[in-house]
Image (spheres, rainbow, N blue to C red):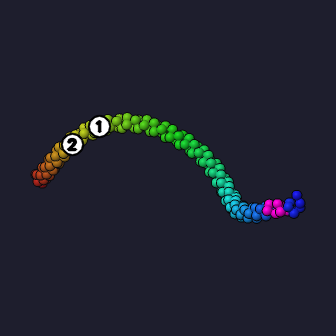
Amino acid sequence: MTEKERLDQLEPLVADIALKQDRMLGQIGMIVDQVSLHTVRLDDLTRRVTSTEKKIDSLANGLGQLTVGLNETRQEMRQRFNQLEQHQSKLEEGQEKLEQHQSKLEEGQEKLERRQGKLEERQGKLEEGQIRLEQRQSNLEQRFDRFENRLEKMDHTQELILMLLKERLK
């Protein structure tokens, strides 16, 4: 084979390779365009992922702080609950003491009521005695009035007697 024949054989192959190469270059251009588009999308997605990661970190940090805050709040609530239980215990003790004092007060009140009943009886007797005394005083006053009348009559009688005696002596 001569060089010309070889060139003639190679020419369609080279033309075919050139055509295929042009197609490949076109496809590579499309692939580059697609890769560029995907690169832009990947960059945007990377920014979004980075932003999302920052937000997740921020949320995780906030959640950590919230967890710490909740734990502190739980501790405070437990302490307050314990304090409430202590206060309730003291209140119950105070309630028991109040009930004991109330019982004593009721006993005292019953004694006072019995004493008051006795005092009322005595007062009734005293009032009866006072009425009797007042009646006696009234009787004594009447007697005294009668006695004074008698004395006056006696004085008058004495005066008359004295007058009569004076007249006789004269």
Amino acid type, callout 2? Ile
Q: Position of residue 147 (x, y in %)?
A: 16, 46
The amino acid type of the residue labelled 1 equals: Gly
Crowding near pointer 2: few (<14 within 10 Å), some, many (20+)?
few
Residue drawn at the location 70% of the way across and 62% of the way down: 34
The kind of secondary structure element at disc 1 is helix
Q: Is residue 9 magenta?
A: yes
The front one of 155 and 102 is: 102
The C terminus: image quadrant: bottom left
- Residue appearing at x 71%, y 63% in the figure: 30
Query: Residue at the spot x=34%, y=36% of the render?
Result: 110
Gap between marks 2 and 1 measured at Cα: 21 Å
Is residue 162 shown to the viewer in this render?
no
Kindly identify which numbered label has been placed on residue 30. none
> How far across and down, in percent of the image, does residue 70 sit?
60, 48
Horizontal side of residue 122 vs 36, given as left or right: left
The dot on residue 131 is: 2
**Residue 85 position within the rendered picture, expressed as x and y whole percent measured from the top left:** 53, 40
Q: Which residues are magenta?
A: 7-13
Q: Which numbered circle lies on residue 117?
A: 1
Which quadrant holds the N terminus? bottom right
